[in-house]
Image (cartoon, helix red, strand yellow):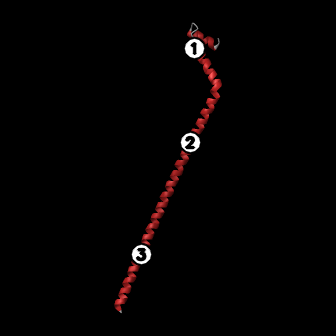
Amino acid sequence: MSKVGKEMAHTGNGSAEPNVEANTIEQVRELLFGQEKRTAEQRHREFEEKLEALHADMLSRFSMLESRLADTERALDQQHNAALEEISNAITDLGSRVRKLVAHARGR
């Protein structure tokens, strides 16, 4: 028995016509647009995969940038502290020289 015959027999009294028409319409849609729909869905999946890869890459790059910024901040802090230490030592040395000059001038 054909598919149409089975549907008619299943529903009885020829009331299967709407089911047959709906099925036929679906078959026509599949023939006309099926490949295009599958292609569009495949492109959509590929786009989503590329977007996810791009997202992961950007997260990785941001993480690397944050790490480099933290390293740069630590290096700048060390340089700043070293410069302050040098200035402090220079001021201490200058104070010591001034005291020696004053002591030498009083000793004359």
Judge the density around disc 2: few (<14), some (14-19), many (≥20) Cα neighbours within 10 Å: few
Q: Residue at x 47, y 60 (%)?
A: 73
Instruction: Assign the N terminus to one quadrant of the image.
Output: top right
Whether residue 5 is situated above or below residue 100 in the rendered picture: above
Mark 3 is on which residue type?
Asn
In this picture, residue 53 sits left or right of residue 104 = right
Mark 1 is on which residue type?
Pro
Residue 48, horizontal then vertical, whole percent: 56, 39
Q: Hey, which quadrant is residue 4 in on the image? A: top right
Q: Secondary structure at mark 3?
A: helix
Checking the image for residue 10, the label placed there is: none
Judge the density around disc 3: few (<14), some (14-19), many (≥20) Cα neighbours within 10 Å: few
N-term mark: 2 or 1: 1
Judge the density around disc 1: few (<14), some (14-19), many (≥20) Cα neighbours within 10 Å: few
Whether residue 57 is situated above or below residue 17 in the rendered picture: below
- Label 2 sits on residue: 51
- Label 1 sits on residue: 18
- Label 3 sits on residue: 89
N-term mark: 3 or 1: 1
Mark 2 is on which residue type?
Leu
Q: Residue at x 38, y 81 (%)?
A: 96
In this picture, residue 98 sits left or right of residue 19 = left
Q: Secondary structure at mark 2?
A: helix
Separation of residues labelled 3 and 1 (CA atoms): 98 Å
Residue 81, horizontal then vertical, whole percent: 43, 67
Q: Nearer the viewer, mark 3 or mark 1?
A: 1
Residue 38, horizontal then vertical, whole percent: 62, 30
Separation of residues labelled 2 and 3 (CA atoms): 56 Å
